[in-house]
Image: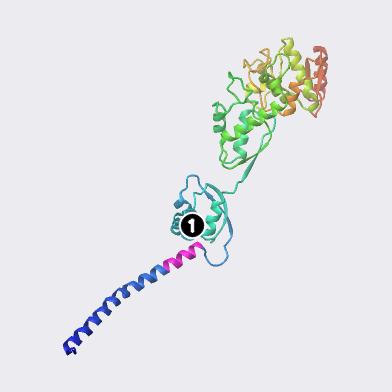
Amino acid sequence: MTRTESERSDALERKRRRRRRVLVPLVFLTPLVLLVAGVYAWYRVQLDPPGSPGAAITVTIPAGSGVRDIGKVLSREKVIDSSFAFDAYVRIDHHGPFDAGEYHLKKHLGIQAAVDVLEKGPVITYVTLRIPPGLWITDVAKQVQKQMPGLSAAKFMEVAGSGAVRSKYEPASVHSLEGLLFPDTYRFTKSDREIDVIRTLVNRFDSVATKDGLDRVHVGTLTPYQVVVVASMVQEESGTDHDRPLIASVIDNRLKINMPLQIDATVLYALQIRKASNTAADRANPSPYNTYVHEGLPPTPIGALAEKSLLAALHPASTTYLYFVVAGRDGHSAFATTLAGHNENVAAARALGLLE
């Protein structure tokens, strides 16, 4: 049976319609495919840009930064071009979280290489803190503020007085870390805060003091804390290492006979100034730290003490000395058992211009 002309015409029309149904979606699909291909190509370039990276750069990621925040920082510093692509890559490939801190990166590094660096963690940079012996705690706080940018002397003093950190040698009735911060050279990270510095200095003191036998102290009737008080006075009054055990013996001998210690450094501490004249008015200061007015030891140490001063207080020389005075421009002292002998030493010191 043969098709009529009309049937052949209908068949051709149906074929043409089928071709139109196929061609119409292709017309619209081609630009979409090209767009997707273009976006993918752009994305690949963001992940791994062509050419070599640019100049080295240190980038700081602030604490609390999320993925988007980090992407914005990296884009701003030109480590990557697109924070959007960074966010997509990290989330799709399940990278992170990333720690706050400093990272050594390069400009135009690309997202993949930047993420590799971030996942290794921040570079640890250290700050050196040098605390010399003899400083009052207020001066230690000032040195912390000066040498460690971002830390505050006021905050240091606040934390030091809060009881958040205590020395094992600090009696329950004492609420001061004066004399219990060990003078030394330390290294801290930029993320360390005031409490971290205080804890480190106190732990160092406790470690040194325990090594030297402060917890097994046998110096007359003194407690370990009182030995620290003596050591702080030795620190302030000694001009040479040779004199430290001798000055400790003077303090020990006076304590045994209930004789006022008459340590000038305690008067200066009571006045809380660096340069104060040793006048009768100063020595009449009613402060409990004034050992001209009050018998016995001051209530706390009067400064940061070196290990040599602690050892001298733990092992005072065996002498009958009750007096000492500066005797040379190198800081060494002359010692005497009697007041007459001391007066002679004082006269000699004045003759050398060592005393007013």
Residue found 24% across the figure and 79% down from its top: 17
Q: Could you tell me residue 239's position as x and y percent?
A: 77, 27
Residue found 76% across the figure and 14% down from its top: 253
* Furthest residue in direction top, as rendered: 257
Question: In this rendering, would 69 be left or right of 133?
Answer: left
Q: Quick one: quadrant of the N terminus?
A: bottom left
User: Magenta segment: does it hold 41?
Assistant: yes
Q: Is residue 61 visible?
A: yes
Residue found 36% across the figure and 72% down from its top: 31
- Element at badge 1? helix
Q: Could you tell me residue 76's position as x and y percent?
A: 49, 56
| Bounds of the magenta segment | 38-47
* Furthest residue in direction front, as rendered: 1
Q: Quick one: quadrant of the C terminus?
A: top right
Q: Quadrant of residue 147?
A: top right
User: Magenta segment: does it hold 213?
Assistant: no
Q: Amino acid at mark 1?
A: Ser
Q: Is residue 297 above or below residue 56?
A: above
Look at the image and name its color scheme: rainbow
Q: How dense is the environment of label 1, judged by Cα within 10 Å: few (below 14), some, or many (20 and up)?
A: some
Q: Is residue 128 above or below residue 135?
A: below
Q: Is residue 50 above or below residue 141?
A: below
Q: Is residue 188 above or below residue 207?
A: below
Q: Nearer the viewer, residue 26 or 107?
A: 26
Q: Please, what is the dominant secondary structure of the magenta stretch?
A: helix
Q: Is residue 356 visible?
A: no
Residue found 29% across the figure and 76% down from its top: 22
Residue topped by disc 1? 75
Q: Could you tell me residue 220's position as x and y percent?
A: 73, 14
